[in-house]
Image (spheres, rainbow, N blue to C red):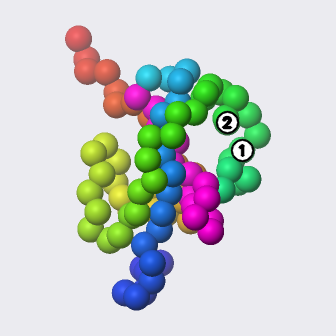
Amino acid sequence: MPQPPDADPPRCAIYRCSRRAETYLYVAMVDGEPDLSRLPDGLLDSLGRREHVMDLELPPGRRLARVDRDEVVAALAEQGFFLQLPPPLPDP
C-alpha cells in the first residue's frame, strides 16, 4: 500500500551480524527505538552478536546499495524486520 505524501517515511535500525559476513538485519523502529519483539525465536542467536551500524529513514525514491527499498519497507511493515544476506558467489 503506498504511503500518503504527508506520512513520515519508515525508519529502521541496521545491524551487522557477527556470525555471517555481509549479513545485515534491518529492524523496524517504533517510537524511535528498534522493535526486536517481532523477530522470530532463535533468529538473533543464529546471527550472533549484533553491531549497530546506523538508523535509516526510507522515503520513497531512496536507493539502497544491495537491496530494493520497496522490498525492505514491505518486510518491515509485514514482519518487523528484513534480513539482507550476502550476494551470491560468482560461478568459477
Query: Which residue is depicted at the point 40% across and 88% down?
Result: 6
Q: Residue at x 57, y 58 (%)?
A: 28
Residue identifier under label 1: 40
Q: Which mark is residue 43?
A: 2
Residue 45: horizontal and vertical position, in percent? Answer: 70, 29
As drawn, is 2 to the left or to the right of 47? left
Bounds of the magenta span?
Answer: 22-34
**Amino acid type shown at disc 1:** Pro
- Sort mark 1 into few (<14), some (14-19) or many (20+) by Cα contacts within 10 Å: few
Decide: is 13 above or below 53: below
Q: Name the quadrant of the C terminus.
A: top left
> In terms of secondary structure, what is the magenta stretch mainly?
strand
Q: Residue at x 34, y 27 (%)?
A: 88
Left or right, residue 19 beside residue 68: right
The question of residue 28 being in magenta is answered with yes
* Distance of label 1 from label 2 (alpha carbons): 6 Å
